[in-house]
Amino acid sequence: MRYELYYWPEIQGRGEFVRLALEEAGADYLDVARSGPRGMAAMMRLMESRAVRQPPFAPPFLKAGNVIVGQTGNILLFLGPRLGLAPRADAGRLWAHQLQLTVADFVLETHDTHHPIAGSLYYEDQKPEAKRRAALFLRERITKFLGYFERVLARSRGRWMTGGKLSYVDLSVFQAIEGLRYAFPNAMSRRAFRSPRLMALRDSVASRPRIARYLASDRRLPFNEMDIWRHYTELDR
Amino acid sequence: MRYELYYWPEIQGRGEFVRLALEEAGADYLDVARSGPRGMAAMMRLMESRAVRQPPFAPPFLKAGNVIVGQTGNILLFLGPRLGLAPRADAGRLWAHQLQLTVADFVLETHDTHHPIAGSLYYEDQKPEAKRRAALFLRERITKFLGYFERVLARSRGRWMTGGKLSYVDLSVFQAIEGLRYAFPNAMSRRAFRSPRLMALRDSVASRPRIARYLASDRRLPFNEMDIWRHYTELDR
């Protein structure tokens, strides 16, 4: 089965959580909007088509045969078992998905540090608000989320988030950390020592052969200031 | 099976999406933190216990026998089939969950209208920012989300979000609309006519016998200004 991933072509964004799973599994997939000059038009056509009975709200979405699946966490819920990246038992799959939804909450809060007022305004139009929000995010929220994930790892029966076997959640936690390290290098360097298990997990993911090859390839887009994770020195105390 | 729901005792909040499903199904459940003077302590104990191997990040969470499930959408993913409130086929269940996650995004954006800077600050400490965010939410986001859900209904093969049979998604859409009507009565009255299918769905849910009895009971907490949906006249142009 060749999967078709639909996502904005210029950012890692939420699409990256899906890409990492597809790459780790060595799956056959097409990154449609990046696949050529007509890729973006194909994505917009699918989003606007009245013939799609179950339209996605926004990218990313995945096409697998006749099925179109939207919402990042839901895509991974669907893909996880197919790619061998989810626990086998139902209870384990629910737990993985629960963690994934918590990663999604964390990622949204990270995004809103530079866009606290509206996604439709430029960062420059909400800079004072962004400074206030980012300071509180770094003081309170980053500690709460990273502390939680560190605790999950401490209680896991193995070295991965859901136990002894890598799952898509580990890839997503890796990505959330990479994004934070890009956006807030100062804050993250100061608090890395309080998340030793998470930092080890980050390294383990980065050195998996397929992930390492992917990260070094041009399929991995660089972080940039159109993305969820943006580096603005004034927000990183 | 007696379910135990754990959620803050003084607000509808995210717990309400779970309550509505349990109520519609006539399920046997205990609303733990509201069940008596020791309910809240029981909830905090469970959240802080080191013996819980898969700790929830935050309420609501559900205990079903030995399983603890967290994250609202994930709880409904788990409960839906058990309560007869989810489509039968796997593809239908994914679609229902996808819609539920979109409701969750909408609900979070609704919340952030009065707390754009931080959940840890009072509304009074972020009022100018809230005014800016709420105005843009009412101008852009409410239209985008309600327009999307209206479109989903228009393309459905039945009168409900996922087809001819009521699912937990319908109950959640009802709740999202009720919350908006409470928080933004002016804005909502002006745009109700553009969402005729959604308004009909809202009425259909409200008049289901078990839901009607629940809404009239004291198990249904009133909306209030500690909740996700708050009525501040200055935010409702």
Image (cartoon, coloured by chain):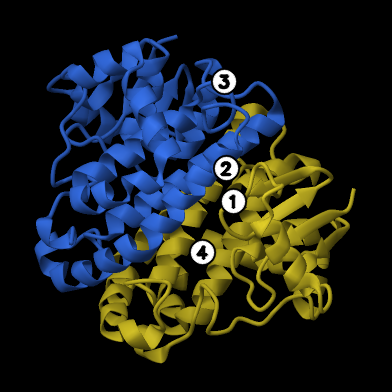
Chain colours: A yellow, B blue
Kind of element beneath mark 4: helix
Distance between mark 2 and mark 3 Cα atoms? 15 Å
Foreground residue, B95 or A81? B95
Density class for disc 4 (Cα within 10 Å; few <14, some 14-19, many ≥20) is few
Among numbered discs 1 and 4, the one appearing first in the sequence: 1
- Residue located 41% across and 30% down the image: B201
In the image, residue B151 sits, relative to residue A227, either above or below, namely above
In the image, residue A34 sits, relative to residue B151, either above or below, namely below
Residue tagged 2? B98
Residue tagged 1? A71
Q: Chain of mark 3?
A: B
Density class for disc 1 (Cα within 10 Å; few <14, some 14-19, many ≥20) is many
Q: Position of residue B62 (x, y in %)?
A: 40, 27
State whether residue A24 appears in this view.
no
Which amino acid type corresponds to the residue marked 3 in the rendered image?
Pro
State whether residue B134 appears in this view.
yes
- Have a look at marks 1 and 3 and say if they share a chain: no
Distance between mark 3 and mark 4 Cα atoms? 39 Å
Residue tagged 4? A196
Q: Looking at the image, is mark 1 or mark 4 nearer the viewer?
A: 1
Which amino acid type corresponds to the residue marked 1 in the rendered image?
Gln
Q: Position of residue A51 (x, y in %)?
A: 71, 47
Q: Position of residue A178 (x, y in %)?
A: 58, 72
User: Answer yes or no: do the residues labelled 1 and 3 have beta carbons within 8 Å?
Assistant: no
User: Answer yes or no: do the residues labelled 1 and 4 have beta carbons within 8 Å?
Assistant: no
Q: Position of residue B221 (x, y in %)?
A: 18, 29
Foreground residue, B44 or B82? B82
